[in-house]
Image (cartoon, grey):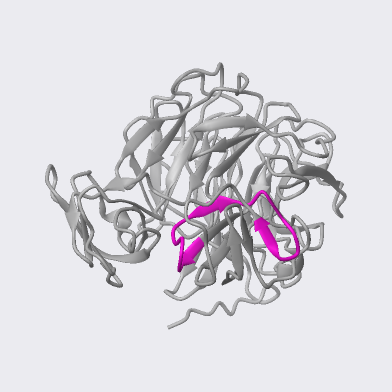
Amino acid sequence: MAVTNWNIPLINKKTWQMMTPAPSASVAWAFFVTDAKERDNTGMYVLSATVQYLYHFDEDAWVQIASGALAGTFGAGACGARWRWSNALTANWGSTTTVTTATAINWIMKGGTIRFLTGTAGNIGKEVEVTSIMTVPGGTNVITFTPALGNAVANADTFKVDKGAYYIMNAGAIAAGIFKSYDPNTWVWTSLGTAGLPAWGTDGRLISTPSDDVFSTGTTSSATSTTLVTTKTWWVNQWTNYQVRIVSGTGIGQVRTISSNTATTLTVPAWTVTPDGTSVYNIEGNDDFLYLLGWNAVAMYRYSISANTWSTMAPTTARAAAPGIGMSANWIGKSWDTQWANEADIKDWRYIYSFRWGAGGTLDRFDIAGGTAGAGAWLNIAYVGLAETFTTGSSYAVSGRYIYIRKDATNRFFKFSIRGHYLEPLSTNLYPDGAALLGDKLFVKAYNDGTSDVLFWLYSIRNTGTELHRLLLF
């Protein structure tokens, strides 16, 4: 049964609720990482290079996890992002409705979507829902799913689950272990590549662009080894740097970053199996990329998860000035605005919004699809509300068409409309905030009734404190 929120702001007062406090008080540079689409049950609280907790929304409770033992010096610039998928898992047997693995897994996977990566041709690219998990410590674990596959899962088949992984960047001199991922499905920390990055500090943000939402779908008209032809009518290059995935038919399971597009045709790196008139495609956010920005520099870096490599972005229009202390960076996914979702001139997914820093109310916007593949473009955005500025202690979170902001150490909250380019007040938490600290400690969680997201909560961790509060948004 759907849950309906009948709160009317002029009638029903917005009230902050106190939740279970964090186990340790927030310190300078501590930050919270959660699902960009607000749908997962856990978030990671990073308090130092060695201390990290998971917060479970359903239980309103915290658990300390094994130390990430991050290299570097925990300080300004430490940041993180959440990826949609788990690490790849290897099957040691299965059936059409089960997959077994000797890798240690946990219950977090239940309810998740499995995507098969390798194996029998008829199974590659197929997606199924996890219905139950039987874990046997030190033995074989059995995952049951639905619907049934056309072929039984075999030894050495690989798969992943959309229950996510955390990517954490520490600050300081670049060294092995300063950048790591943590998979909460298997409890594994993995050290990742850092070549091409500068020493990291001042302030920073790491952004993921997950593929949860589908922006366009259809059946392929024709294709070549590097193209996919459709019956659509698109704006030229509006899909640059998105990803296209073949979801059924010839070539199922293949995912490619879109290099460019014409009104009807996508250009991509070469297909392994060329799609044809049976191939159904989805255009989605790009699961392969993470964006890193900050360090008091206009430069921005992009990480390829599949290649485990960094590259320096070369935007067609450079950022006008560097972001500094108190900066933000938020990717706007599905805005729920019909004009932004117009498939002929898409705006959803395209933008990373970044407030520069405290002394002024300057806001910059990066167009991921602007220009050519690997480039993008920056634009300064003028907005109503320039008298409000955001400095040390400010935190930011995004949901739909709004960027939510906690100002400095005032416990005053605002929301910025990306649709209308204006800033408006949201709330004031009467519980006093602590001294201003760097580090994002604001996040949104959606409640799903099994069909759709129906309630949205804004969470805030107090500066220099353990207190956690939440506010019902709508």
Name the residue at 67% across, 43% down: 329
Quadrant location of the C terminus in the rendered image: bottom right
Quadrant of residue 142 within the rendered picture: bottom left
Per the image, is 257 magenta? yes
Name the residue at 67% across, 41% down: 394
Name the residue at 66% across, 58% down: 266
Please say whether residue 166 is visible from this viewpoint.
yes
Q: Where does residue 383 sit, x and y in percent of width and height?
A: 85, 53
Q: Where does residue 103 sit, x and y in percent of width and height?
A: 22, 44
In the image, the segment drawn in magenta is 246-266
Looking at the image, residue 411 sits to the left or right of residue 386; the answer is left
Looking at the image, residue 155 sits to the left or right of residue 214; the answer is left
Looking at the image, residue 213 sits to the left or right of residue 341; the answer is left
Quadrant of residue 97 within the rendered picture: bottom left
Q: Where does residue 87 sit, x and y in percent of width and height?
A: 37, 44
Quadrant location of the N terminus in the rendered image: bottom left
